[in-house]
Amino acid sequence: MRPSLLHKTVFVWSDLYYNYSFPDDHPFKSIRESLTKKFLDQLGLFHEIKQVEPDPIDEEVLLQVHSKDYINVVKRMSERGHGMLDDGDTPAFRGIYEASLARVAGNLKALKEIESGNFVHAINIGGGLHHAKRSSAGGFCVFNDIAIVAKEAEKKYNRIVILDIDGHHFDGTQSLLYDDDKSLKISMHMYHANFFPGSGSVNEVGEGKGKGFTINVPLPPGTGDDAYIMAFDEIVYPAILRYKPDLIVLEVGGDSHFGDPLVELKLSTNGYLHVVRKVHELAHQLSDGRLIMTGGGGYNYDATARVWTLSIAEIAGIKEMELETLHDCCGTASTPFVMEKVKKVIEQLKEIHNIS
């Protein structure tokens, strides 16, 4: 079924994305992107979605959120080809600076295509590196393309929503935008003692003029579709509806999937699609359709690629029978214990953020 013009979608892609892939047995591999491209090709979705390349950018763009000293460190480590960019998760390799810059460029191209009015939706599965902070890498992320695109978008739009459904908390994005009152930041993530990155409690709500503009939805291990959807429907959906954004940025990390080896959430493709579908509807209802989707984490490569492909098709308004082959066989359910824990989180958030 051909998509409506209301869903006119652009897919931003550079072969340089393949270079952002860590060596040896590191879990972050660009096979996720190559599998997604393969699925999109096999399903013929590029007949309906235009593919474009990012425009070249330089380090001046990075300075909106990163320090000059840190950028220089990444350059030196990139030339050297070894060493660590953080405490142990993000090793340098030759060319990591250029590979990281390309993924930031992808998000900026997505924003440019939306701002031009040529497209209402833009996809950049190379984006979503949300752990990078001002002066350090973190969690496999070198430059924070989410915070950068938010700062760029603020030059035109007054109200931006960043919704992150990656299995890990968006600590870098949060820290870089914690005092920002032009963006509402929302993260749904797994949270318990000793789980990376150790942040993302309900009490982290922003500071200064940005107080109240950060909403964290910490979820216990074992959260299935039912509890996850309940948290989204009762907290995230009404918060976005109340905020009335001009633009929505949606990070779809694949590591909330039940098959992910690093995260213990239990979201299925059905749970993911509930969230993506509702966000897509909100974009049309509130933001004239303006929606940027990025990738994120995801270490079960097949599951991540399926989640991304199904999400792209939903956003583009494409309903093909062949897409059903990418879905999990069934949804997932939470135990009564987990359900009660999620209900308590919802109660806390409703009180903290005055959500009725």
Image (cartoon, rainbow, N blue to C red):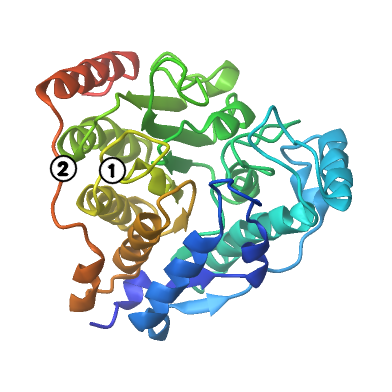
Vertical side of 290 occupied by 215: above or below:
above
Q: CA distance from mark 1 to mark 2?
A: 8 Å
Marking on residue 58: none
Residue type marked 2: Thr
Does residue 284 appear to the left or right of 103 in the view shown?
A: left
Does residue 265 appear to the left or right of 18 in the view shown?
A: left
Q: Is residue 252 visible?
A: no
- Residue found 32% across the figure and 58% down from its top: 284
Dot 1 falls on a residue whose secondary structure is loop
Q: Quadrant of residue 98?
A: bottom right
Q: Extreme left residue here?
A: 336
Q: In the rendering, at what x and y percent does residue 58 appear?
A: 81, 57
Q: Quadrant of residue 17?
A: bottom right
- Residue found 26% across the figure and 55% down from its top: 277
Q: Quadrant of the N terminus?
A: bottom left
Marking on residue 332: 2
Residue type marked 1: Phe
Question: Circle 1: is it few (<14), some (14-19), or many (20+) Cα within 10 Å?
Answer: many
Please give the residue where the numbered disc 1 appears in the rendered image: 258
Disc 1 and disc 2 in contact, CB within 8 angstroms: yes
Dot 2 falls on a residue whose secondary structure is loop
Vertical side of 82 occupied by 342: above or below:
above
Q: In the rendering, at what x and y percent does residue 318 appear?
A: 28, 74
Of residues 80 and 110, the one nearer the viewer is 80
